Amino acid sequence: MKLFAQHGYGKSDKIESGLEEGLIDGVIFEARYLHPDKAKDEIGCLQEIDETVELMIDPEYYASAVIDSPNAQLGYLEDWGYFSPLRIIEFVTNPTRVDKIVHSSLDIQEDVGATTLIAPSVYISQSLDSMESALALSFLRKAVSASEKRSKKVLSTLSLNRDALLNSKQLIEFVDALTGMSKRPSGVYLTVGVNSSSGNNGLPSPEIFDLKVLAAWMYLNYALSINGIRVINGFSDLLSPFLGVAGGDAGATGWWSNLQCFSIDRYIRSEDIRRRPLRRYLSMKLMARINARDMDAFVALRPEIANQLPHDRDYEEREPDRTSEMLQTWEALAKLLESVDCKDVTQGIRDLSNIIETAHKTWAGLREREFTQGQESVDEYLEQLEYSLDEFQEMAEL
C-alpha cells in the first residue's frame, strides 16, 4: 500500500523532506491551502525532487455546503473557479450544473500540473439513502464520463460521514449501484468523516475506530477493489494498514489531527481557544502516539516501544521540531504498511491480528509497571480494532 502526505496548513518543509527521504509516495494537496496562482510552482518544485511522485489536488467541493455559514473558513477555496455555493434544488432543476462543475475542476487541476485528477463531489452527511447520496452518484457518473476525454487518470470523490456507514443494507445497496454502473470509475478518492476529529491520548477518534465504521470502511475498499477500482483513502492515518489489507491502494496522513481524521467541521471556525498540539511519537508496537516528553519514561519501562528506526534519534533527550515529528510518523506508518500483506486478504487479516495482539501485550506490560494513564481508552481502541476484523470478514463473506 502506498502512503501519501495529506497536505494542509503549516506545510513548511515537511513534504519536501518526506519526498527526499523516500517516506511518501505522493501528495494530496488541499485546495483550501493552495492558491491556484501558485499551484503550478508548488507542484513543479516537488517534481524536481521526485519526477515520479503522484501529485493530486482535493477540490474540496464538499465544503460548499457551509459556504453561507458566518463562521465558514474556506481559505483559498473561493479563488478556485469551480467553487460555488451548494444548492441541491439547483442541481435538480439544472442537470447540466454537475457536468460544468466537474469539467471546470478537472480543467484547472490539469492546467496547474496535477499528475492525477480528483473530481469534485458532495458530502453524504447522514444516510446513503438520501438526496445527498443520489447527488454524489450523479457527480461520480459525470466524473467517469469526463475521464474518457482526459489523458490523466481521474479519481471520483466519495466523501461520507461515518454515520452513513452504520446501515449495512444501505451500504451494500449503494456499493451495488456504484459497481453496477455500465461505466465504472477507474479510481476513487475515499474519505470517511467524523463529527469530532479529536482523539484521546494519541489514539484515533473513537468515532472512526468503532468496529462497525472501520469494518464498513474496509468493506468499501474491498468491494471497490475487487471490481477493479483503485481506492485512495484520505485522512486514514493509523487505520491505513486495515484499509490496505482490504484492498486500498493508498492511505494518507498529515501533521495536525484534522489531517489525520476528516470532519466537515474543519471548514467551520471554532470559537474555542486552541492550544498548540503536543509533539508525539508514533510507536508501532503500541499502535498509538505517545507524548514526546514521555518517550524516555516509556522506553525505560518497555524498550520495545521504540521503533528502532532512523528518526528515533530526533527524540533523544529533546522534543523534535514539527518537520521531524511528521517524518517520524510517515517512517513508522510506512514500516507498519510493509508488515501487512496487502495482496492476500486472509494473510493480511492474520498480520493485523498479530499487530493488535502485540499492542495488547505491550500496553499490558506498561500496566504491570503501574502505568495506567488512559488505559480504558486503549483497551476499547484495541478491542474495537479486533472486532472490526470479524465484522469485515462477515460483510465481505470471507
Image: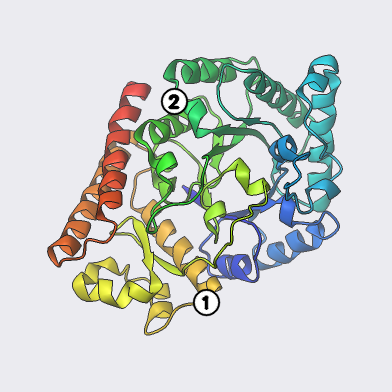
Q: Is residue 387 visible?
A: yes
Q: Is residue 119 visible?
A: no
**Residue at the spot x=39%, y=41% of the render?**
209
108 relative to 388 in the view: left or right: right
Residue 129, above or below 97 = above
239 relative to 11 in the view: left or right: left
Dot 1 or dot 2: first in sequence order is 2
The x and y percentages for residue 329 are: 45, 63
Q: Where's the C terminus, which quadrant? A: top left
Residue that label 2 marks: 166
**Residue at the spot x=76%, y=54% of the render?**
75
Residue that label 1 marks: 321
Residue extending furthest toward the bottom: 317
Examine the image and state in which quarter residue 328 appears.
Answer: bottom left
Structural crowding at the residue carrying mark 1, measured as other residues with C-alpha within 10 Å and reported as few (<14), some (14–19) or many (≥20): few
Secondary structure beneath dot 1 equals: loop
